[in-house]
Amino acid sequence: MTLTIVEALPIRVLLVEDECLVSEMVAESLARQGFCVHTATSGTEALQHLASAPVDVLFTDIALDGGMDGTALAQRARSLLPDLPVVYASGGMQMFDVAARVPHSIFVAKPYDPDVVGRVLRRAIGTGAARLPA
């Protein structure tokens, strides 16, 4: 009998945030929590990454510079990857058009604790642990 040990792979997060300091702080915190984090500062940059690299969960600010807000980004991302978990963040609910959000998405109000965001991201992909290889 042969036992195979399967190592858990880190959850791949695409963090879309146009405020550099916020992006750096959150990316560092998520990396310390075991996530593999790629950052983007615009919807266009995020879509380019989604088209070229695997992503397990999209974590996007709603108010983004560059002509595409987070809700439009999430809609376009879901057209590429229909099952992609989405977590939105915003400094105010007034910026969040609930009708424009993609189904089964999660909203996190700013300011948020990056440690809490880690738990939310794991919940969004439906696991409390790292993802396993396919």
Image (spheres, rainbow, N blue to C red):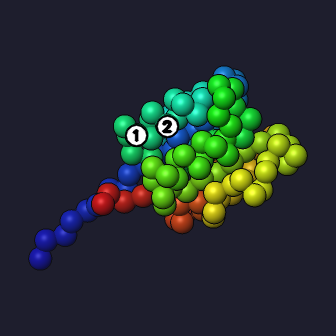
The percent position of residue 56, horizontal first and vertical second, equals: 47, 51
Q: Nearer the viewer, residue 23 or 61?
A: 61
Residue 29: tell me if it is visible.
Answer: no
Disc 1/disc 2 C-alpha distance (Å): 6 Å
* Quadrant location of the N terminus in the rendered image: bottom left
The percent position of residue 39, horizontal first and vertical second, equals: 54, 32
The percent position of residue 12, horizontal first and vertical second, equals: 46, 46
**Crowd rating for badge 1 (residues with CA inside 10 Å; few <14, some 14–19, many 20+):** few
Marks 1 and 2 in Cβ contact (< 8 Å): yes
Q: Of the numbered discs in the image, which one, if any, rests on residue 47?
A: 2
Query: Viewed as shown, does residue 36 lie left or right of 15?
Result: left
Q: Nearer the viewer, residue 110 or 30?
A: 110
At 37% from the left and 37% from the top, the residue drawn is 52
Q: Of the numbered discs in the image, which one, if any, rests on residue 7?
A: none
Kind of residue at badge 2: Leu
Query: Viewed as shown, does residue 12 lie left or right of 23?
Result: left
Q: Of the numbered discs in the image, which one, if any, rests on residue 51?
A: 1
58 in relation to 17, above or below: below
Instruction: Indicate the secondary structure of the residue bearing disc 1.
Output: helix
42 in relation to 50, above or below: above
